[in-house]
Amino acid sequence: MTQLSMHQRLPFDEATTPPRVSTGELPQAEEVERLVTEAYQRYRATTEGQVADYIPVLAEASPDWFGICVVGARGRSFEIGDVDTHFSIQSVSKPFVFALVCDAVGYDAARRRLGVNSTGFPFNSLMAVELNDDRTMNPLVNAGAIATTSLVPGTTAEEKFERIREGLSRFAGRELSVSEEVYASESASNMRNQGIAHLLHSYGRLYFDPDRATEAYTRQCSVEVTVHDLAVMAATLANGGVNPQTQETVIARGVCRRVLAVMATAGLYELSGDWLYEIGMPGKSGVSGGVVTVSPGKGGLATFSPPLDPAGNSVRGQLVTKFLSERLGLNLFASEPVRPQP
Ligand code: GLU
């Protein structure tokens, strides 16, 4: 018997043929439209949550902005509410940039350099609880996300960012650009992220100059999107990495399902477990009020509503996603018992 160390990984075989999948389809178009409309009406009057203000420009968002969009794996979309309002993508960019990095450097190398667990500590560690806040090492919390950005191919911050902008645009199926107003506001108030980058650098866990990496990361968070863009991006992750509206292959299938695994583990900050418990799908939220949720094989759901819970997750986003997850049959863990034939 050989002893495995904590940092060793099992030598899983690569699937030789595309792995078989276990997904179904969304309900009929009229049913989806009816339920999306019902979700919108049901939660429009919700007043809970606070608009983020630690980045000054985000405080200007209206708490009333509210939009929902579902894009099916066949490319059909259903949307309601503030679907044309532009907002900065913020943390919702993280799984997509992680996907681009996995595609560029390989998902195994990416895991080794960034980590994919929710805390990076053994399951029974007290230290994990004590030090959880900024020490969680996966691509969806700031430390891991800045390290991910630092791994994007390119020799300058501009080259790295252009690669990110272009990759996010392929996910969305249209050319995305930066909100210079958000970038300026966030650059002037991101000392904490600068600190994280320097700390990572001191531990040899950053792969580019810390200040330049933070700059590229901040630009990445300032890319402007609509709720429709986010739903198309989510639907691309639901469709084996192929954008269902443009039919472009954005990332490899093997990368796609691993990105979803990381989103399931860590997509909703420290409430990721609660999210999975109630909603049962990979998701990612951001402080400007966006949430994406992926139903593998079926489609992507995005919501936009700026008031957040204390962990930084959109309140309406969570309510709508829970409602639709149940009514559209999206929860990955739900099953119906088979009745034996008499
Ligand atoms: N740009 C934001 C930050 O780094 C993103 C935070 C978020 O959406 O969670 O603080």
Image (spheres, helix red, strand yellow):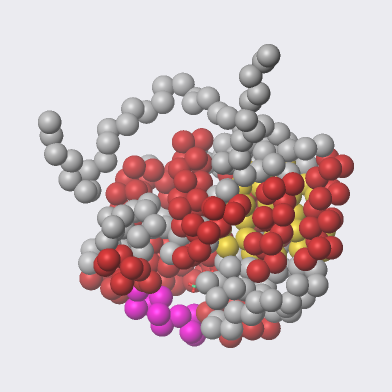
Image quarter of the N terminus:
top left
- Residue 41 horizontal/vertical position (percent): 84, 63
Q: Is 143 left, or right, of 313 in this rendering?
A: left
Q: How many marks?
A: 0
Q: Is residue 47 above or below residue 206?
A: below
Q: Is residue 281 above or below residue 12?
A: below
- Residue 188 horizontal/vertical position (percent): 49, 85
Tell me the residue at 55%/72% (across/down): 312
Tell me the residue at 59%/83% (across/down): 53
- Residue 86 horizontal/vertical position (percent): 71, 68
Q: Nearer the viewer, residue 7 or 273?
A: 273
Return the residue found at the far front. Answer: 342
- Residue 242 horizontal/vertical position (percent): 61, 38
Q: Is residue 336 above or below residue 65?
A: above
Read off the magenta span.
187-196
Residue 29 highlighted magenta (yes or no): no
Viewer can see residue 15? yes
Q: Is residue 53 above or below residue 139?
A: below
Q: Is 220 left, or right, of 322 in this rendering?
A: left
Q: Is 26 left, or right, of 208 in this rendering?
A: right
Tell me the residue at 45%/43% (across/down): 258
Tell me the residue at 67%/55% (across/down): 322
Return the residue found at the far top. Answer: 342
Q: Nearer the viewer, residue 47 or 148?
A: 47
Q: Nearer the viewer, residue 281 or 157?
A: 281
Residue 191 highlighted magenta (yes or no): yes
Which secondary structure dominates the residues rendered in magenta? Answer: helix
Examine the image and state in which quarter residue 155 appears: bottom left
